[in-house]
Image (cartoon, coloured by chain):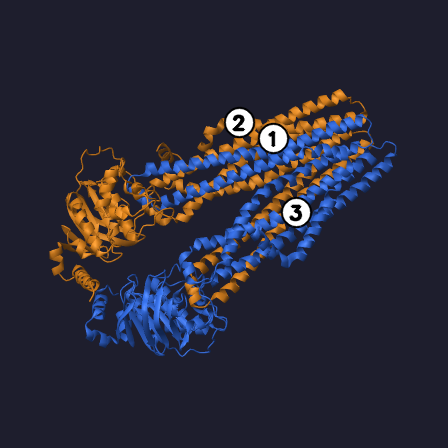
Amino acid sequence: MQRSRSIAQEPVSLKHYFTPHRRAIGATLLCAVVTVGCNLAMPLYIRWVIDGLTAGTLARPQLVHYAWQFALIALVSVLFSRFLRSVPLRISHKIEYALRNDVFDHLTRLDQAFYRSERTGDLMTRMSSDIVIIRDSIGQGLLQGMRTVVVILLASVVMAMADPQLALIMLAVFTPMVAVFFLVLRLMRRHQQELQEHVSDVSNFCQESFAGIRCLKGFALERRRNQQFHDLNAGLVRKTMRMQASRQVLWPFMAFWFNLGTILIFIVGGRKIIDGRLTLGTLTQFIQYLLYMQWPLLALSWVLSMLQRGKVSWVRVKAILEREPRIATLENGEPEPAALAASIGFGNVGVDIDGRTLLEGIDLEIPAGMTLGITGPTGSGKTLLVSLVARLLDPTRGSVSVGGRDVRQLSLARLRGMIGFAAQEPVLFSRTLEHNIGFGVAQSDAQLIGWAAEVAHLSHDVEGFPDQYQTLLGERGVTLSGGQRQRTAISRAIARRPDILILDDVLSAVDTQTEAAIMSKLRPVMAERTTLFVSHRVSTLRYADEIVVIEGGRITQRGTHEDLVRKPGYYAELDTMQQLREKLEAGP
Amino acid sequence: MKSAKRLLAYSLPYWRWLAIALALILFTALAINFLPVLIQRMTDQSLMDGSKPGGERIALLLRLGALYLAIAGLGHFVRYLQGMLTVWIGQRIIYDLRIEVFSKVLRMHQAYFDRTAVGTLMTRVTSDIERLQHFVTDGVVGSVADIFMFLGIMGYMVYISPLLSLCIFATLPPLFGTMYYVNLKLRDANRDIRDRQSRLNALLQEDLTGMTTIQLFNREASAHADFDQRNTDLRAAHFEEVRWFSLYFPTVETGQALAILITLVAGGIAILAGSEAVTIGTFVAFLAYIRDFFRPLGSLSDKAGSFQVALASTERIFALLDTREEVADPTQPETPERIAGSIAFNNVWFAYDKENWVLKNLSFSVEPGRVLAVVGATGAGKSTIINLIGRFYDVQRGSVTIDGTDVRHFSKHDLRSHLGYVFQDPFIFTGTVADNIGLQTPGLERDAVVRAARMVNAHHFIEALPRGYDTVLNERGEGLSLGQKQLIVMARTLAQDPELLFVLDEATASIDTATELLIQDALAKMMANRTSIVIAHRLSTIRHADHILVMRHGELVDQGTHAELMARDGYYRQLYELLRHAPQP
């Protein structure tokens, strides 16, 4: 809650995710200094032992002494080397966690328009792989970045002190190596991207073939399809080989470069040794540094490209965080009324979406306790109309009011708390049935759940389930039929005992007998509250106090069932057709 | 193990290449690991040998240095070649296997697809195969390379100094044990991460689809709490992974430090004792070996445990390859040049599932060139008739014949090349409009495609597309209306010039009146002079049919022409009245 307010005031930034970890970041630096320091000190002992042995000045007690010191330093280095890894990586996972939670929190505030414009798959990618890339670039950036910087600084000092000429050779060896490595890495990444695109082509091809298998078989296309798959696959092999041509270079190249460095040091240093200007110990010390510095320096190019990718991913994640919720409580300082009547008003409401007018000139006064039936052809705007009451979207023109108050001036929690909403294609969650029915109730009990299921004519079905109300829904549990899903949605809506009940074509998937049974139980519940229900069935609509017909976004007919069946128009047609169907179902 | 053996069979065609790869591995192991021996020679014979004159020592240093570089260059080059060869062999094996899996899936019968989710099949051809590929290249060949590398180093070490080598080798068992253990833990942790990540993703996916519901019921806070719970679980798994990962490299570093320490102490003591066997050169060479010694060890301990995972994928792939194809082709199929076009159902019984009969003792026949309409309520078994003629399923009892030959005597592929379908759900392939109509049929010219499109009234809107017939469509045919997609699909069927035509004709509410008229007209043209069966919902098609079958609950309740049936005032008349009042565009 606090966070999102701060977002509205200041630009979204990654910086404040680091703030709580300042001390841990300091600790990482300390670990890097100690580890690198120890690692640079260890070759010194090798040098002393070798020099002592060649000069014949080393006695056995001194050797043992060196050995102990070496062991101690190695121990310290290994210990800190562990923390050098665990501390920054833990930070990165903590930031990953916090970031993901914040994005989710923000997602729960975003409106329906946002979800219509974004594909779920894309949001999923940003929540998983993009955040993972951000995390990795933070963790590896801290770990490798700090270590590399410390290595370069400390090693330059130590090497310059040991032998400036050899130090220069090291510089001459490493600079081109890092550059070439960087180039090969870039080449590899480019080929990798091409390969990745080809891989997704192949998998799209498979997806399409399997999804369209009927069409494929119907047209006897298997042979042609197999041939195309052959070609695609051959391309896959070609692109893989191209990517590998650069990837396989990396390791032999690095190893060869190391050999080159070794031999350079041996020849230049060797001449000095023969001239008596250098000891073998010092030469060995440099070879050890060559070995030790190789990876941290190569990591430089790796980390740089990682940070680059992290930045791209952060931009994508930031885009979610920066999207302001369009449906939010209007803060005008007016106190919320203590009691609010359940009356609903539409004042000259019009809705445009993407430049198309979907609702126009809707004027309705629905007094508290009334049952309003809504019907009309598919796509005429019925669902849109009822969505306005719950502020799933705001009207483009005019206003919607509840209890005489513009809904935009009520808090969202308050407004939606008054409403029980059931949709034609309801979303149920992969939890227990009890959880789903009691979804909108803070404290649900078995009695309430049982009642809600009873009213929606669901309790009989539940008895057949393995664990009754504790049965899991979804893939891991019971898959409900369309009708059962709709009835669960009705139970969920009425379990809230709402002041306003909205049923959006919730009986479309049940047969007429079940429908009649549900209606007989639902009618008393509807009578106690303001009810809006959308339906295509005259048998349901007839119970409404008033019925409106919506065609092409406008109200074309209104009145009671008795009024409307007598007037020519959509409703009367609907009535005739329904009678015919009943006759047909009754059979000869 | 059985599947490992079977997998081996796929590498048999490439055994020559594998033998070459093995030779290259052997060469690399011998060449690269010889380098420290040269270092030892340089140290002992040039740098430390004060008995020779300086010039001679420098000349020797340069000579050995040049040899060193030459061997290093050659060794690493061969290693590169070997790497590429290994990747190539792996790719070839996977290429063969992937194609086998794909064509196997295409051969499966329709009922298999009713049962199996597309996602599952996708996993087989993508991630399972990929895992197998890693197993073949990195796992098997990589392990062999690691072992040779390791043995090469050990061999040279013993050659230089048996004493020092034995001291260092003594540290190997505990070290390898530790690394194996750490890798095991790392793998467990990674599995936990994957599990928890997918649990988090499942929740997220559901919440994103159901966000409106969550908001309507004021459940944002509890949704967040649930999410936080799984996010915390995931973080805990990550922490566990960090814990073991941060031990991995320090373990290797410990091994290296220990080996250096042993070299210093044991070597130093030996030199101090005046031993001939250990020289300063031995020292320097060993320091070089220690660097490479631990790398193959680490990667071996990593691979040792990953075999299990790969075997599971292998088994799943072979299970798919072994699945029985239920609608099989006859061994000696009939291959008629043309089909005259008479179709007959003889006492056909059919159920998709056990004894839930969808068709009960159905018999009827269609004369060549006639149009048969099948009407009935939803679930009467109408579309099953079409499925059986094309052998998407086979009948349980009775028979379906074309020109008097049982359809089970045809090969599916041949049979279907005579049949044309217009389904109610138009399927668009990724590709151009022309490809979608012509299906890249060999010998089918652009003219024929355009002619088919003109015939079904699709030419005008196709011409109006940004690139006409070359406009690229995606799988869902975005940018086209449903009616337009239906017209394209009809043109596709017509372009194949089928001898028998089957139409699932459903008046769809979302098609505008103008397009609807175009579709009706196109249907009439397609059915003219062609044996056709129409599962009819449009009054126009029903009225124009030569013969009408009235179906109810899998049984034929009536048949005749429209006029005859209407005169009888039975079930048909009621159906007809209903259709008349249905929202016709």
Residue for badge 3: B144
In the picture, one chain is blue; tell me its letter: B
Residue for badge 2: A26
Residue for badge 1: A150
Please, which chain is the residue tagged with disc 3 on? B
Residue at point 24% right, 41% down?
A450
Q: Answer yes or no: do the residues labelled 1 and 3 have beta carbons within 8 Å? A: no
Q: Amino acid at mark 2?
A: Gly
Specify whether residue A191 is in view. Answer: no
Farthest residue, direction top? A61
Q: Could you tell me how far apart the alpha carbons at marks 1 and 2 are, in whole angstroms?
A: 13 Å
- x and y percentages locating residue B394 in the rendered image: 40, 67
- x and y percentages locating residue A126 in the rendered image: 44, 44
Is A390 in front, or is A85?
A85
Q: Amino acid at mark 3?
A: Val
Left or right of residue B276: residue B414 = left
The mark nearer the N terminus, 1 or 2, is 2
Left or right of residue A509: residue A128 = right
Quarter-of-image position of residue A212: bottom left
Q: Which secondary structure, mark 2?
A: helix
Q: Colour of chain A?
A: orange
